[in-house]
Amino acid sequence: MKKEIIINSTSIETRIALLEDGQLVELLVERPQYERNVGSIYKGVVRKVMPGMEAAFIDIGWEQDAFLHFSDLSDLAVNEDGEVDEVVNAANHDKYRNLSNGQEILVQIVKEPLGNKGPRVTTQVALPGRSVVLVPYHSHIGVSRRITDHKERRRLKALASKIKPEGFGVIVRTVAETKSGEDLKNDMNSQLSQWRRLEKKIANAQAKTLIFKDMSMASSVIRDLFTSDISSLVVDSKQLFRQINKYLSEVAVHLLEKVSLYSGGKPIFDHYDIESEIEKSLARKVWLEGGGYIIIEQTEALVTIDVNSGRFMGKQAHEDNSLKVNLRAAREITRQLKLRDLGGLIVIDFIDLWEERNRKKVYDEIRKELKRDRSKSDITPISQFGLMEMTRQRIKPSLMYTFNEPCPTCNGTGMVPSRETVSTEIERWVKRFHSRTKEKKLEITLSPELYEYMTQGFKNRVRQMMLKNGILIKLLRDESLKIDDYICYSSKQDKIVTDSYRY
């Protein structure tokens, strides 16, 4: 399989595309207002401990508090002197006893903020290098699960145990496969030196201070994903091209020959047919080979994916045709999960399959494709109703939230109140207003659409309101108002009174 990394960098944003055999499988976007925060370390303050939620809210100086679940509590905390203390190990539900409101604590961001939710943090801080991850205050040695050769895993674990500093844990990364002990040691020493500098900063820093910020998204991709199995990396920015070459000349000279600067006339994403794929990744409907399609709906609570046969005209029996569509859908769904970066709870409604063995084939196909996904996931077998439930690790907002913002009219629901609903609400408002004030005059400003609806035809809604309530209503229109907005003005009170009589 041919793997490529294509980077488009402008003053507004940096976009990183990962291609497999020319097909877009992952897209990462970084903008100045949405800088990468995962990996950043803060000296925070415990604002509120919530034992019932098994969580605490940590003030790290942001507008939104960070969320710390008790399962993300290590056996460490920062004492009043800014030093890291070791505390008693305990079950998750007892760990909150090590926390108190106002306590300073060292945390690292593991998930970006989403909507009204703040970032998720952990006290198990780690410093990632290219080959190894250094974990202060721990002693565990781990090897990336993506290294599947048992002999190589044993070799790397033995090397890590020899070079591991006292009082630190080590995780050997995928890129370390086949590397020598000297390579791992050099990377380890670099991370250790960085941590020694951070220790001094932690001791002297005030609360709610940024202690460490990880690399930019582009740099972290080079560090984490640019490995020997990548055939080429192409970038269209001279400045970024120089930065990448400088970094690789220090840590991976053998990869320099794979990096090139794009100088074509067309925009780089157009040249590699990536722009059209991004457009498709934002659509609700995704067509499958042969005529089937899937519908992807995203909400804050969960993601639903519906599989449909569409125009697919198979030549086999219904069960076999359904199986064929479901298998194609399974491959496309796993691709879309990565491409859109969908996370949280996901429910997939496959076409009904009567035979258990066929349902298992679809389940096995999903599992096989998910092995290539960098995010952790957990899936259940397809139920008798054709539903598969799964969870997928969510680290940052999906592409939908990166490229879009909620509609100011419907606030992201996709629905707006009908004209009849709003006009009925206004009728109730007028009745409530008149019964409380006994005023005889009122001025109401509406959107043009609602104005037309309420003044046209035999059933003139405004005339009826005036007759029923014994009040004179002057109706105005305002182009800036949404269909469900209205402004009520009382000349007697000489002020806008809309909110005063809503309930």
Image (cartoon, rainbow, N blue to C red):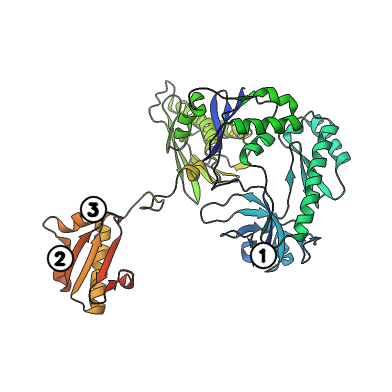
Q: Residue at x 13, y 70 (%)?
A: 467
Provide residue 17's location: percent of width, then percent of height: 56, 32
Q: Residue at x 82, y 36 (%)?
A: 186
Relative vertical location of residue 309 with respect to residue 36 in this rendering, above or below: above
Under circle 2, the secondary element is: helix
Under circle 1, the secondary element is: strand
Q: As shown in the figure, which amino acid type bears the numbered disc 3?
A: Glu
Under circle 3, the secondary element is: helix
Q: As shown in the figure, which amino acid type bears the numbered disc 2?
A: Gln
Q: Is residue 76 visible?
A: no
Q: Quadrant of residue 159?
A: top right
For the residues labelled 2 and 3, the Cα–Cα distance comes to 19 Å
Instruction: Report the residue marked by disc 1.
Output: 46
Q: Quadrant of residue 76?
A: bottom right
Q: Residue at x 47, y 42 (%)?
A: 403
* Image quarter (top left, top right, bottom left or bottom right) of the C terminus: bottom left
Q: Is residue 15 left or right of residue 203?
A: left
Q: Are marks 1 and 2 in contact (CB under 8 Å)?
A: no
Depth-wise, is mark 1 or mark 2 nearer the camera?
Answer: 1
Viewer-closest of 79 and 415: 79
Q: As shown in the figure, which amino acid type bears the numbered disc 1?
A: Val
Q: Quadrant of residue 210?
A: bottom right
Q: Are marks 1 and 3 in contact (CB under 8 Å)?
A: no
For the residues labelled 1 and 3, the Cα–Cα distance comes to 50 Å
Relative vertical location of residue 388 with respect to residue 176 in this rendering, above or below: below
Q: Is residue 482 left or right of residue 397?
A: left
Q: Counting residues from the N terminus, which is met first, the one under dot 2 or under dot 3?
A: 3
Instruction: Report the residue marked by disc 3.
Output: 449
Give neighbour class at mark 1: few <14, some 14-19, many 20+ (Cα, 10 Å).
many
Depth-wise, is mark 2 or mark 3 nearer the camera?
Answer: 3
Tag shown at residue 464? 2
Q: Is residue 265 left or right of residue 199?
A: left
